[in-house]
Image (cartoon, rainbow, N blue to C red):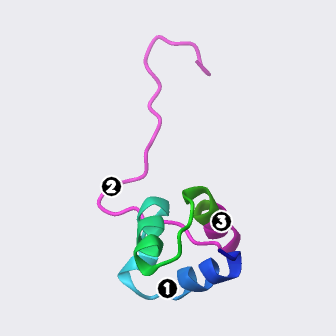
Amino acid sequence: MSGAVVIDAMLATRGTPEGLDGLRKMTAHLRRQGPVVAHCTVDRLMRDVGMNGVRRGKEAARHHPRPGRAPGR
């Protein structure tokens, strides 16, 4: 499967609910559409195009250091 075909299929999802999906859901969506693609291919092409999933319902993860521990450990 050509990378250009997969990119066109990914770009066709922009503006739709599927366009907000991350790697796992985008791979499943593309496989349902027809092209057999590997998740690593979808990952690479999503990075190249600048697409990434949208975090819904959760705040960004924050690191809270444990008290009594040395910094950086």
The magenta region covers: 44-73
Q: Sort mark 2 into few (<14), some (14-19) or many (20+) by Cα contacts within 10 Å.
A: few
Outermost residue toward the left in this view: 57
Question: Which residue is located at x 40 percent, y 75 percent?
Answer: 32
**Residue 72 screen position, x and y as percent:** 62, 22
Q: Earlier in the sequence, mark 3 or mark 2?
A: 3
Q: Which mark is residue 14?
A: 1
Q: Amino acid at mark 3?
A: Arg
**Residue 47 screen position, x and y as percent:** 65, 65
- Of the two numbered discs 2 and 1 in the rendering, the one whose residue sits closer to the viewer: 1
Q: Amino acid at mark 2?
A: Lys
Image label count: 3
Q: Which mark is residue 39?
A: none
Q: Which residue is mark 3?
A: 47
Split into 4 quadrants, where in the image is the N terminus?
bottom right
Q: Earlier in the sequence, mark 2 or mark 1?
A: 1
Give the CA separation, mark 3 to mark 1: 15 Å
Give the CA separation, mark 2 to mark 1: 23 Å
Q: Amino acid at mark 1?
A: Arg
- Of the two numbered discs 3 and 2 in the rendering, the one whose residue sits closer to the viewer: 3
In what element is the residue under mark 2? Answer: loop
Instruction: Report the front residue among 56 and 48.
Output: 48
| Snapshot quadrant of residue 10 | bottom right
Question: Which residue is located at x 40 percent, y 62 percent?
Answer: 55
- Residue 51 is one of the magenta-drawn residues: yes
Question: What is the magenta segment's predominant secondary structure?
Answer: loop
**Residue 56 screen position, x and y as percent:** 34, 63
Q: Which residue is mark 2?
A: 58
Question: Which residue is located at x 61 percent, y 86 percent?
Answer: 8
Instruction: Report the front residue among 40 and 66.
Output: 40
